[in-house]
Image (cartoon, rainbow, N blue to C red):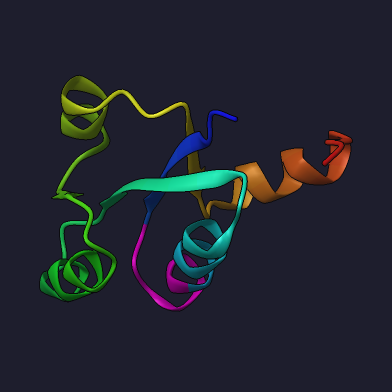
Amino acid sequence: MNKLRISVAGAGLIGKTHIKLVAESDQCELASIVDPSAGAIDVAEQYGVPVFDSLRLCLLKISPMALFWRHQTSCMLSRRINVST
């Protein structure tokens, strides 16, 4: 089975939760972390993935299949979209 390659934007409190969930999933693979902060480098090293300081670079370099990010608009949209697992 091919795993879904996911990049996570943000390595803060919520981002670390997303990173952990993706990394521990049997169906997903953590592809990278996108965050310009110095702390993101440590998180990326912990999980053995590359870190990018912009979404543009991430998309150009590794082309993940999906992207998690925390944003008010995305939260509002996710409440309207029924995603089956």
**Residue 40: quadrant of the picture:** bottom left
The residue at the point 15 percent across, 31 percent down is 57
21 displayed left or right of 58? right
Which residues fall within the magenta stretch?
A: 10-16
As drawn, 85 above or below 37: above
The residue at the point 16 percent across, 75 percent down is 42
As drawn, 39 above or below 3: below
As drawn, 19 above or below 7: below
68 displayed left or right of 76? left
- The answer to whether residue 12 is magenta is yes
As drawn, 43 above or below 8: below
59 displayed left or right of 10? left
> Which of the pair 55/51 is nearer the observer?
51
Q: Which percent across, then down, holds residue 32?
A: 29, 47
Q: How many marks?
A: 0
Can you say which quadrant of the picture contains the N terminus?
top right
The residue at the point 68 percent across, 50 percent down is 75
> Which of the pair 64/70 is nearer the observer?
64
**Residue 55: quadrant of the picture:** top left
Q: Which percent across, then down, holds residue 14?
A: 51, 71
Q: Which percent across, then down, holds residue 39?
A: 18, 76
Q: Which percent across, then down, holds residue 76?
A: 74, 46
> Which of the pair 24/32 is nearer the observer?
24
- The answer to whether residue 11 is magenta is yes
Can you say which quadrant of the picture contains the C terminus?
top right
The residue at the point 76 percent across, 42 percent down is 78
